Image (cartoon, rainbow, N blue to C red):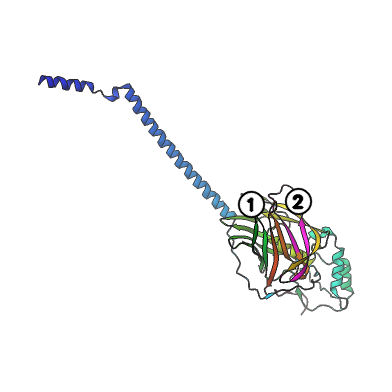
Amino acid sequence: MRKFWIIEFIIASSRRDPRLDPEQTLLATHGRSRRMKSRWVGLLLVLLVLLGHLSGLSWLRNQLQVFKPMVPMAEPLFTRTIVPMAPVPYSVPIRSHEAEAKPDKVPVPASAPLAPIVEAEAEAIPAAAHEQTSQEPPTEPLAKVFEASEPAVAAVLPVTDTWPADTRLTYRLTGNYRGPIYGSARVQWQREQSRYQVQVDLSLALVIQVAMISQGQVTDNGLVPSAYEEQYPGSVQRMAFDGGYVKFQDGTQKLQPPGLQDTASQFVELSHRFSTGRDALKIGSEVPLWLARPQGMALWTYDVVELDTLQTTEFGALSAFHLQPRPIANPRGAITAEIWFAPSLQYLPVRVRIALGADNFIDLLVERIEQGVTPAPQVTEQPGNP
């Protein structure tokens, strides 16, 4: 028994409390420190993730407030296709709201036709006046002709609506991007009273769909965009016009210059300027235009370089003025667009060639033009008449 007691005593003596061992104590302390550090690192990561989510939600909320979702207009009803016709002479400038407020009667000549007189006056307008509003009162020679006439107009006068009816142009798309590409495209213009929508759709090989949509107001001075959107496969880029500022995709904003257009609205705006004579469509003239995209804006100048004859399937040989853009300072990419406008087709853009840099390009050539019912002219009553 004593032998076993001695053995047990030796074993018990050999068991030392680890808390009393300096080496074991150091290892235990180091382990606890590592565990605490791991916990703090994990907590810090969680906080960073939460802050990132909160920042993202705040940015998204601001984006939603700036770029309100577009509400598309109902699809218009197209009732006819148009064919080439002799261009209509420039119409008399629309009266301004200030002029409409005056109750004076406007006499009309009884004999001499109006169109040559207006054309003669349009030639006398200096190039600088093209940038002004079309609401200016008649020039002095034209007013003298009116005063020389004897008959007066009726009590009710129609106010000419110079904007086109709802219109859809369908194009054949060809081009090159790392090889030949084919598809279709369309430009669609529609209006509901003072609101408009222009949509440009590109379909490449029935797989890639790209859309550019512009919405805004129709004014006496032209189109005034309020929202613009570019839709690509898997992404959407937006731009807003509000309070005299342009708000871009990256959150920056700049002052909005007069007459600013976007990529989609420019087609209708330029067509209207040419059809009303606000800008001269003749070889050698230049057309300045502020253009904006979600990445920025710049002042572009189109030169009317020549009158081309385009061979089309639907309309045969078409005479169209060729507009070529000048290079701009600090371009945001290599994309430029040449445009052809046909006077015999209501000055609509019948060809668009988009250069994508190097030998890459997209070429759109008109195939079909559809229109809806022409809006009835607005009628205003002249004060003082029964």
Q: Position of residue 127 (x, y in %)?
A: 83, 59
- For label 1, the crowd category at 10 Å Cα-Cα, with few meaning under 14, some 14 to 19 and many 20 or more, is many
Residue at the image point whose x is 70% and y is 57% from the top = 354
Amino acid marked by disc 1: Phe
Residue 327 - label: 2
Local SS, label 1: loop
> Which residue extends farthest left?
1
Q: Position of residue 349 (x, y in %)?
A: 73, 65
Q: Which residues are magenta?
A: 313-340
Q: Nearer the viewer, residue 331 or 49?
A: 331
Q: Position of residue 27 (x, y in %)?
A: 35, 26
- For label 2, the crowd category at 10 Å Cα-Cα, with few meaning under 14, some 14 to 19 and many 20 or more, is few
- Establish if 346 lies above or below 26: below
- Establish if 2 lies above or below 163: above
Q: Of the residues under marks 1 and 2, which one precedes in the sequence?
A: 1
Q: Does the image show residue 94?
A: no
Q: Position of residue 54 (x, y in %)?
A: 50, 47
From the image, which quarter does the N terminus lie in? top left
Check residue 325 for magenta coloring. Answer: yes
Question: What count of labels does the image hold?
Answer: 2
**Disc 1 vs disc 2: which is toward the camera?**
2
> Which residue extends farthest bottom?
386
Q: CA distance from mark 1 to mark 2?
A: 22 Å
Callouts 1 and 2 close, C-beta under 8 Å: no
Q: Nearer the viewer, residue 36 or 322?
A: 322
Pointer 1 residue: 248
